[in-house]
Amino acid sequence: MSVNAVAQDPPATSGPMVGHTTDSSAMIWMYAPKTSQLEISLKEVSKPNKVSRYSFDPISDPAGVLAGVPYTVTLNGLKPLTSYSYRVSVDGKSEAVHSGTFQTAPVAGKASKFRMAVTSCMKIGQPQTSWQLLLNEKPNLHVTLGDTQYSDTTNPTIQWKHHLRYRAVAEFNAVLRSTPNYAMWDDHDYGPNNSDGTAAGKENSLVGWNQVWANPESGTADTPGAFFKFTWGDVEVFMVDGRYHRSPDNAPDDDKKRMLGDSQFNWLVDGLKNSKAKFKVIASGSTLADSKNDGWRIYTFARHRLFDAIGENKISGVIYMSGDVHRSRVWTHPESDRVGYPLIEVVSSGVANSKTLSYATVDFDTTIDDPSVQVRIVHGDGKTYADKTWKLSELTPKQ
C-alpha cells in the first residue's frame, strides 16, 4: 500500500486506547466525529455486576480539517493490580471493537513483578502476526519506541491520517485497547527520515503527538519535547526525546553535538539521581551503537556525557531501550566501564517492519532479595532468540 493511500480517508472512529495508567487511575483515548457524545462503562473483572460510567472530554481539533477529534477520559478511584473491562459508546451506540481490558499498575514505589512489552517500527501493509504473539505473552504494559507510523512529514494533517489508518489495523488495535500503552516518537513519526531539531514544523508535530497518544504530560515548563517519565511499581521509565533538540547527524562529532539538548539531558540526569526505583529505564528510538548513520554512535560527546553521569553519580540499575534498526537484540555496551557495571541495551525493532517481525519482553521482579530483570527477544515465528537475566547486584557500581 502506498504512502498516499495510507494518508487518505481515515476511519470515522479510532480506538479506544488505554494510555497512562497508575495504581489508581487509567486514561482512555478515543477518536470520533465532532460533537459526538462518548461514554465509557467500566467494571472490575471480578465484580461484573457493578458498573461505573464516565463521560469523555474532547480535545481541540488536531488539524482543522479532519472530520473528528480526539476524546479522553481519566478513570479515577481504581484499585492497584486490578483487572478491569470497559466498553465505549458513541452517541449511545457501542461496537465490540470499542471494548477492552487492562490491569492497573502496582502501588508506586512498592516491590512488584510484571512484564513489559517493547516494540517499534509498526508498518501498515506488512505482516501483523507478532501483535497477537505479544498479546499472548500477557504483558502488563506496552512501550513503543518510535516509527509508530511512517508519514515522514511534520504536516499534522498527514500525520493524523497516518495514525488513524495504522490504528485501524485489527492486530495493532487489539494491543492498544487491551494493554496500557506508552509511546515515544522517532524520525518517521516526528518528521522526515533521520530528522533532527532543525526540522521545520516540529512544533506542529509535538502538538499532534500529544493529542494522538495518552502519555503523561510531556516536556517541562521551560523545555518543549515529547519526553516524560512514569513509574510502574518500583521501576521508573524515562522516555527521552532524541529528535526535538537533536543536532544534525552530519554535524562535527565534537563537544557541541547534542542528542537530547542540554535541558532535557539535565532533566534526565536529575531524574536518575533522585529516583528511588530499583531499576531505571532510559527509553528512546535511537540505538546506542547499531546505527552508523543516525544514533548515539556518532554522538560521542553526548554518549560519553550520559555514561559518565551514570557512573560518577553511582546510579544503579540503569537499562537502555531502543528501536529504529529493524532488528532486535539484547547486549552489553563495550564502554560499560564508564558506567561502572554492564550497561544493557534492549533493541526491539521491526514488530511489523522487518524480516524477523521481532519484539522484546522485559520481566522485572523486585519482590526477591536480589531483584532481577529478564529480557527475551521473540521473532514472528514464535521462537525466542535471546533470553538473558541480570540481577540488580550485577548492575550496581562497586563502592
Image (cartoon, helix red, strand yellow):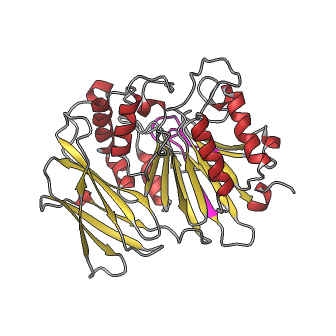
Q: Quick one: 207 or 7, which is closer to the camera?
A: 207
Q: Residue furthest right?
A: 399
Question: Where does residue 179 sit, x and y in percent of width and height?
Answer: 42, 59
Residue range (magenta): 346-364
**Which quadrant, please, contains the N terminus?**
top left
Q: Residue at x 64, y 66 (%)?
A: 365
226 left or right of 376 in image: left
253 left or right of 67 in image: right
Residue 322 against residue 58 in the figure, above or below: above
Residue 121 against residue 230 in the figure, above or below: above
Question: Where does residue 255 sit, x and y in percent of width and height?
Answer: 71, 25
Question: Where does residue 222 sit, x and y in percent of width and height?
Answer: 49, 41
9 left or right of 240 in image: left
191 left or right of 388 in image: left
Q: Is residue 356 magenta-colored?
A: yes
Q: Is residue 272 visible?
A: yes
Q: Residue at x 25, y 35 (%)?
A: 63
Q: Is residue 355 magenta-colored?
A: yes
Q: Is residue 2 visible?
A: no
